[in-house]
Amino acid sequence: MSRGRGANKPILPSASVDARRRAAAILEVLGGLRTPAQAAEDLGTSLQRYYVLERRAVAGLVSVLDRAEHRRWRGER
C-alpha cells in the first residue's frame, strides 16, 4: 500500500535525530521486531532507562489520542 506524497518525509521534521531514534526503537520493541534489551543497547542506555522512555512514549501517545477523541466528540478539530 502506498503512503502517498511525501512518504519519505519525516513526520516531525523539528524532532531531533536522537528523539526519532528513540521513537523508532520503542516502536520496534512494541511491534515485536526486537527486545527491550536490544533497543537499550542500540540506544546506549540501560534497560531501566529504556523502560522509562517507553512508558513516557506510550503515555504521550495515549494522551494525544484521548485529546483527539475528546475534540471529535465535542465536534472540534
Image (tube, rainbow, N blue to C red):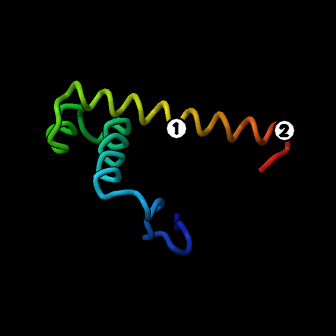
Residue 26 percent across, percent down from the top left:
34, 40
Please indicate whether residue 41 sits to the left or right of residue 16 in the image: left
Residue 72 percent across, percent down from the top left:
78, 42
Q: Within 10 Å of the Cα at label 1, are there few (<14), some (14-19), or many (20+) other Cα atoms? A: few
Given residues 47 and 16, the one toward you in this image is 16
- Going from N to C along the chain, the mark reached first, 2 or 1, is 1
Which of the numbered marks, if any, corresponds to residue 25? none
Which residue is farthest bottom?
A: 5
Q: Which residue is mark 2?
A: 74
The residue lying at 67 percent from left, 37 percent from top is: 67
Q: Quadrant of residue 31?
A: top left
Badge 1 amino acid: Leu
Under circle 2, the secondary element is: helix
Which residue is farthest right?
A: 75
Residue 43 percent across, percent down from the top left:
19, 44
Q: Within 10 Å of the Cα at label 2, are there few (<14), some (14-19), or many (20+) other Cα atoms? A: few
Please indicate whether residue 33 sits to the left or right of residue 75 in the image: left
Badge 2 amino acid: Arg
The residue lying at 58 percent from left, 33 percent from top is: 63
Q: Which residue is mark 1?
A: 61
* Vertical relation: 44 (above or below) 50: below
The residue lying at 43 percent from left, 70 percent from top is: 8
Which residue is farthest top?
A: 48
Please indicate whether residue 12 sits to the left or right of residue 44 in the image: right
The residue lying at 16 percent from left, 30 percent from top is: 46
Under circle 1, the secondary element is: helix
How far apart, in angstroms, are the residues tagged by discs 2 and 1? 20 Å
Residue 27 percent across, percent down from the top left:
37, 42
